[in-house]
């Protein structure tokens, strides 16, 4: 007998509302979009970030190794088309400089998260958590008005699928977390 995941799909739609979860943003305040914003809303219960986050094979030390390749650990798809995460596109330094998690106007890099700088932080009911990824213009250009599907697959985390809708309200939003 299979497991009914329909309630999980409904929860994901609540956490990532289709019209309000993905944006292209301008981080440099130069009028040009340069990053992707994925916004999650805590609709379940308040929770505290654990003091230790263990993600298999993903540690601060592993990311700092010369041979670390983000593309080997995660596969990202936009509208069922794989986004190239080869070392030529994203390397460990790029991940550390271009990935941010933002909660209550405080930003955290991947390194900060793995170092435990989020530990003990409470994510309240109704709080938003923003995932901000600086990406190149060619990948941003793939985001057009209409319906889209975003999927992250990994051996270390469960697959995340988000369906979203982009309208003119979702493009080139000024965003600051400094």
Image (tube, rainbow, N blue to C red):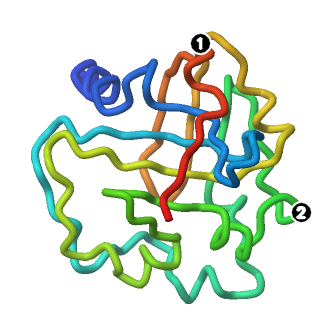
The residue under label 2 is 88
State left or right for residue 77 relative to residue 45: right
Using the rendered image of the protein, determine whether residue 52 is visible from the camera's viewpoint. Answer: yes
Q: How many angstroms separate mark 1 from mark 2 (CA)?
A: 29 Å
State which tag comes first along the sequence, 1 or 2. Answer: 2
- Give 176 or 114, whichever is nearer the viewer: 176
Q: Is residue 29 above or below residue 87?
A: above
- Give 73 or 22, whichever is nearer the viewer: 22
Q: Is residue 26 above or below residue 106?
A: above
Quarter assignment of residue 108 = bottom left
Q: Is residue 5 above or below residue 114?
A: above
**Image location (x, y in percent) of residue 62:** 59, 83
State the SS at label 1: strand
Q: Residue at x 71, y 26 (%)?
A: 143
The residue under label 1 is 147
State left or right for residue 85 relative to residue 113: right
- Give 36 or 63, whichever is nearer the viewer: 36
State left or right for residue 113 relative to residue 142: left
């Amino acid at each position: 007998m299979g497991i009914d995941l329909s309630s999980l799909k409904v929860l994901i739609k609540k956490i990532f509302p289709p019209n309000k979860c993905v944006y292209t943003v301008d981080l440099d305040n130069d009028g040009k979009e340069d990053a992707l914003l994925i916004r999650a809303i805590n609709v379940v219960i308040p929770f505290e970030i654990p003091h230790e986050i263990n993600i298999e094979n993903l540690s601060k030390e592993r990311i700092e190794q010369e041979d670390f390749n983000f593309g080997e650990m995660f596969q990202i798809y936009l509208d069922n088309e794989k986004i190239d995460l080869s070392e030529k596109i994203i390397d460990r330094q790029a991940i550390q400089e271009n990935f941010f998690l933002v909660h209550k106007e405080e930003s955290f890099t991947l390194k900060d998260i793995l170092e435990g700088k989020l530990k003990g932080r409470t994510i309240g009911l109704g709080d938003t958590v923003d995932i901000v990824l600086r990406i190149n213009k060619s990948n941003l250009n793939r985001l057009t008005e209409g319906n889209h599907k975003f999927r992250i697959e990994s051996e270390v985390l469960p697959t995340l699928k988000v369906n979203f809708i982009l309208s003119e309200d979702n493009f080139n939003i000024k965003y600051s977390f400094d």
